Image (cartoon, grey):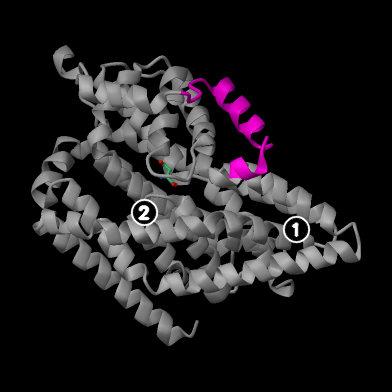
Amino acid sequence: MASNSSNRLLVLIILGILSGIFLGGLIPEAGRAVSFLGELFLRALFVMVVPLVMSSMIVGVSSLGDVRQLGQLGGRTILFFMTTTGIAVAIGLILVLAIHPGVPLENQALEPSNESAQEVSQRMEDKPTTLGALLKTILTSMVPHNLFAAMANTEVLPLIVFSLMFGGILTTIGEKGTIVIRLFEGINEAIMGIVHLLMWVAPIGIGALIAGRLGEAGGFAGFWPQLQSLGAYAGTVILALLLHGLIVLPIVLRFLGKQSIPAFAKVMSAPLMTAFSTSSSSATMPLTIDSLIEKGHISRRTVSFVIPLGATINMNGTALYEAVAAVFIAQSYGIELGLGETIIVLLTATLSAIGAAGIPEAGLVTMVIVLKAVDLPIEGVSLILVIDWFLDRCRTTVNVWSDAVGAAVIDRLEGGRENP
Ligand code: ASP
């Protein structure tokens, strides 16, 4: 996309966001009335996810040439994801321990309202609540028992695993394989063409999603008390996310990815704003892929592998938030965690973020694992429920940003520019 048109798109998206904030904030009913436009945008993004993940993975792996390269690419990617997630959690923990946003409340105040306790237990239904159970679920879910069911439910991880196998095998069966690869190349190009078009409705979609959600919260008048009541906690999460997103990741991008920070941030502006408005790394994935390849000139084969995987398992923001939230809940119950328990929070937050799906508020559910690991009351979740919709947007933006930085770094390490 020419630089002029990408500048125009950026301006339109910013205008969309500002209109959404004012409309939903000042006239909540109007915000709610336009929210269906946001829903349309979200659906249009989601429908791209399955064909895009499958076609780009199949094409990507078949272009590797030597399947051993997949081991190196995969190894580097996982190492990058785990390291940055660990750093994010450490930042969150340091800040929450230093700021100490949780003040022990009267016992009565800690009684969760029936409604929120019910909401939490409803969300947890059928979800693994221990680390062992979660790891088992992740491992078993990597192999789909029915390919079409996995597609129908947008279960990305099993689709990634299947597509990698399928693409790899296609390269070993000669001409017949080449024909199928060509078919998936065509599918991939067509989907990317649609994503390209979708970019241009992003300003309206993003604006409407923000207007709708602010409207649902009762506009500024409803949102402000929510923010105030949990101000210290929300402030700690946001500050930690800012430190990670604006300092740590850019340093990694500059020194390991050898990218200009402002130029790369501009490339990622549409996906980042989409992440903020949709609260979903998966829904944002099509735009992330398009922007990195078309505007960021990161090689297609790196992007096709790193971004679907990253949108599914790499959640820097979520892991950071889970650690802060768990410690905040402990502080609110008057429980001080020791060093050993803090380390357990660090490890479980890192792992449970991997298990969180790239959909809205998934992190709230997997946080139960962190709470259980250090014996904190699960009902504590109800203390932070009211503001989660907002923090979810902030952490999803960092999740998507860290995927993109990962793609830039890994592409450089893999010598991506020589292998477009
Ligand atoms: N909404 C987040 C995402 O899609 C996951 C979460 O933290 O709830 O990345």
Relative height, residue 77 to residue 171 (above, below): above
Mark identifier at residue 247 = none
Q: Can residue 294 be seen in this view?
A: yes
Foreground pick, 14 / 257: 14
Label 2 packing within 10 angstroms: few (<14), some (14-19), many (20+): many
Q: Observer-nearest residue: 416 or 379? A: 379
Q: Identify the disc placed on residue 61.
A: 1
Instruction: Classify mark 2: helix, strand or loop.
Output: helix
Where residue 97 appears, as percent x and y from the top left, is 33, 31
Q: Residue at x 62, y 25 (%)?
A: 136
Left or right, 348 with respect to 167, comes to left
User: What are the residue bounds of the magenta stretch?
Assistant: 126-150
Where residue 419 sits, quadrant-wise, is bottom right
Residue 82 vertical position relative to residue 102 in the rendered view, above or below = below
**Rendered location of residue 339, percent (x, y):** 45, 21
How dense is the environment of label 1, judged by Cα within 10 Å: few (below 14), some, or many (20 and up)?
many
Residue beneath disc 2: 278
Q: Can residue 256 be seen in this view?
A: no
Look at label 2 and name its amino acid.
Answer: Thr
